[in-house]
Amino acid sequence: MAAREILTVAEMTAGDKAAIAAGTPGTQLMERAGRAVTQAILERFSPRRTVVLCGPGNNGGDGYVVARMLAEHGWDVSVQVAAPPKSADAIAAAARWTGPVGLLNAAAANAELVVDAIFGAGLDRPLTAEIQRLARASERWAHKVVAVDTPSGLSGDTGRKVGEECFHAALTVTFHRRKPGHVLQPGLSYCGEVAVADIGLGETPAQLWENTPDLWLARFPWPAVNAHKHARGRMIVVSGEPWSTGAARLAARSGLRVGAGLVTLLSPPEALRVNAAHLEAVMLKPFETELELEAAASDAEAVVIGPAAGVNEATLGNVLGLARTGAALVLDADALTVFRNDPGELFSALDRDDVLTPHVGEFERIFPGMLKAAPERISAARSAARRAQATVLLKGPDTVVASPDGRAAVNLNGTPWLATAGSGDVLAGLIGGLIAQGMESFEAACAGAWIHAQAGAAVGPGLISEDLPGKVPEVLKDLWERGV
């Protein structure tokens, strides 16, 4: 399959208009959308007493189609109207519904299934008081709500509430492509399961994608038949002081697990003994000064620095020294925070092969105010990538990866089990290991984030970060079997 784009509301509207201009009537698109929602309901629910809530626009028109089609399957269906249909297509769809119709009211909560077709992704104003009351109450019975396109009250572009309230759903059926509101928090939580239905629209070029293997698997750096360790890339990880060495070892082990041929942990002399006691396939080498570190890393394809490195002048100098080597840098944690007083010094040393992997707090330290000023995380990550002229991976339950050329991807397989100390160190190592093998940095960051989340889900409850590298082979085997 081709990588699937994520479309803004404007891009989706343009796709609808293009299909209509090419000869597909709007009423036919509405029938296809209603049929897709109906099919999704039939696949998941047995016949039951159902209320369809219809708004005045095309989202409401989709709802009338759903009501008619469910009734044709023998379901007990009624319609509650938030406002009379206004668009020509919605008026036509409403005219074909011959079942019971009433005004929207709190009795909808008594239905066994509620279809929310009041407003879709393009909503630009808060819900009225009556709809807000129902939306607020829906949090208690979200398990029986199916939303058409987006839960009413949710912005399709930001994943945030347009006003004070938003419907909560167990299932959201959207059309053609996901919108940012389906993949960004809190919208991701409001939507429940998201099903994407094909309604026959044409290609819609975009620079934002779902981060799935379809985006990067064709360029994954599998070893050739005649591969040897030197051909599979050299990766360096910089260790912290004796009492802060575990994070770097997690990154090193992860880089080795994801396929880097040679991984070396560069360690301050006083930390050599503690590192040596825990290493096997990962090699170990001492360094004392920034220049020694630079020389030791000069032959590496990728370097990971930051995990428990220390927020001090030594780390700052080490980053700047490594930036002179030509190796791609994966900068995490302390290697970012150390530049909090002068982010420009960091950015001036970076190039487009480098990757920054901040969580929200670290992002704020080196890109102050950018996240708050942006409409959502995707825009913030893109702005940060342009500012740094490097790939930026903004961590979270809705991890965003952005390239300075405008490409961006959002992770859809996040898992809460990764919310534990050391998880980010593993992610940095995975990305570094993929870059060391020749994978382009943006795609390596996307692949690393996806593999990281899959490994986390495979471990599940009770996960600690030490579990993650050992789950990587299982994930890689699945990817290998997909690609052959």
Image (cartoon, rainbow, N blue to C red):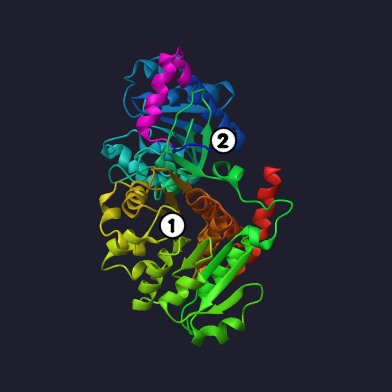
Q: Is residue 16 magenta?
A: yes
Q: Earlier in the sequence, mark 2 or mark 1?
A: 2
Which residue occupies 42% across, 37% down? Answer: 150
Considering depth in this image, is 455 or 302 the residue closer to the camera? 302
Instruction: Determine which residue is flagged by label 2.
Output: 2
Q: Position of residue 428 (x, y in %)?
A: 50, 63
State the SS at label 1: loop
Tell me where residue 70 sits by quadrant: top right
**Residue numbers of the magenta segment:** 7-30
Q: Position of residue 460 (x, y in %)?
A: 60, 62
| 284 relative to 27, above or below | below
Q: Position of residue 217 (x, y in %)?
A: 60, 45
Q: Quadrant of the N terminus?
A: top right
Q: Position of residue 79 (x, y in %)?
A: 43, 27
| 241 relative to 261, above or below | below
Amino acid type of the residue that numbered disc 1 sits on in the rendered structure: Asp
Our reading of the magenta stretch's main secondary structure is helix
Looking at this rendering, what residue extends furthest in the right direction? 225
Q: Is residue 265 magenta?
A: no
Q: Is residue 395 left or right of residue 347?
A: right
Amino acid type of the residue that numbered disc 2 sits on in the rendered structure: Ala
- Give the class, few, some or many, for how many residues have Cα within 10 Å of label 2's Cα (few <14, many ≥20): few
Considering depth in this image, is 109 or 54 the residue closer to the camera? 54
Which residue occupies 49% across, 52% down? Answer: 441
Q: Which mark is residue 354?
A: 1
Which residue occupies 55% across, 84% down? Answer: 272
- Whether residue 384 is visible here, answered yes or no, is yes
Considering depth in this image, is 256 or 187 the residue closer to the camera? 256
